[in-house]
Image (cartoon, helix red, strand yellow):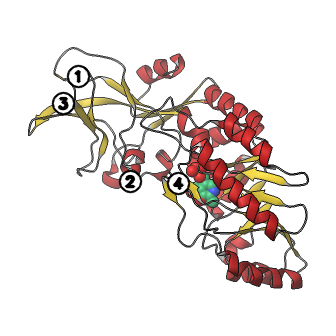
Amino acid sequence: MLPEAVRDRALSARLPAYVYDLAGLRSHAASIRDSVPAEVFYAAKANPDARILAALQPYVDGVEVSSGGELTHVRETLPGARLAFGGPGKTDEELALPAYRIHVESPHELRRLAALRQERDVLLRVNLPVAATGAALSMDGPFGMDPEALGTCLDLLARTPWLRLRGVHAHLASGLGAAQSLGVSAQVLGWARSWLDGPSEINLGGGMAVDYRNPGDRFDWAAYGSGLAALRQAGETLRIEPGRAVTAYCGWYVTDVLDVKRSHGEWYAVLRGGTHHLRTPAAKGHDQPLTVLATRSGPAASGPVTLVGQLCTPKDVFARRAPVERIAIGDVVAFAMAGAYAWNISHHDFLMHPKPAFVYVNE
Ligand SMILES: Cc1ncc(COP(=O)(O)O)c(C=O)c1O
């Protein structure tokens, strides 16, 4: 569903434009906060836009950052926000940056943190071998530590009182529905309780699913929240750090049709802009959900139509064989679900086309 204010601005903005619905974002974030009996740290990597961070701030307990650049940006944008600093391959300069919590990825990283001799609050990131059926992306690889490596960390922590062990962190998969997320959370909690001694913090990660093929089918925060409430034990601080499922729905990439043509029997619409602005469909391999807004008379294609951008590569595709009834030169197209891993993961400078406008509605 396209909010009226988004439609109005889409039809009047300089194109291409990202249009963000801030009221929609606030009410979505409020419903997540009200459903989930855990601290919510927003994963800034999904969309670190300053206006989005500011809109989210009242509804989240903190922000998860994964680089010195993100940390500095979020600290400047939201002074005083609690920051959890994670991510593999932190440099010494990054390790020295102050954060509310630091997620340590390896025994070597812990040694380097200890060498700074600063008072720090640490979560050890563990790469548990859990079953995550249905995950779009399983975080296999160099993320966190195998449980066997944690003993080395405990030995070091016993000798470095300036490092306070607060608990554990586990972000193991993404693209999980509520039932699968809960299954992973239960496995992490079961392991953490057997490993940790006494009340502790357990960060269960992000990765809540967004279904680009069925935009109406959203992650069931109420089911996840009530499941987590049943799992939760007194004295524990539970935390989650979702990104995509928080901001995906608040953004639209809007642009217009420059050309329509038939090639080898297939209809194509060539749009202003491209995947250098909205890389999400190319990165995830899906068709970006879309609405054709203004229908003009004149040269038109009728569905199925493949919508492409201005880049000189066959990978510059927004949606393949979309079942649009008619799409004409000059029509305006709004791609939905463009609020997360969209502009900020795109290769903006490829071919040096102009950057999009950024428009905020329902502020
Ligand atoms: C450590 C960590 N936490 C949170 C997230 C956010 O995941 P998502 O946007 O899928 O919720 C990511 C994403 O890669 C991550 O690596």
| Residue labelled with disc 3 | 260
Name the front one of labels 4 and 3.
Answer: 4
Q: Position of residue 156 (x, y in %)?
A: 81, 84
Label 4 crowd (10 A; few <14 / some 14-19 / many >=20): some
Q: Is label 4 within 8 A of ligand 1 (CB to nearest ligand atom)?
A: no
Pointers 1 and 3 in contact (C-beta within 8 Å): yes
Answer few, some or many: residues within 10 Å of disc 3's Cα (few below 14, many 20 plus, some between 14 and 19).
Answer: many
Mark 2 belongs to which amino acid?
Asp
Name the foreground residue: 124 vs 83: 124
- Which disc number belongs to residue 328? 1
Position of 332 compared to 109: left or right? left
The first of marks 1 and 2 along the sequence is 1
Question: Do we see residue 298 in this rendering?
Answer: yes
Which of the marked residues, 4 or 2, is nearer the chain's N terminus? 4
SS of the residue under disc 3: strand
- Residue 133, numbered circle: 4
| SS class, disc 1 | strand
Image quadrant assignment for residue 203 = bottom right
User: How far is the residue under mark 1 from the one under mark 3?
Assistant: 7 Å
Q: Amino acid at mark 4?
A: Thr
Going from the N terminus, do you reach mark 3 or mark 2 first?
3
Where is residue 178 shown, x and y percent of the image?
62, 42
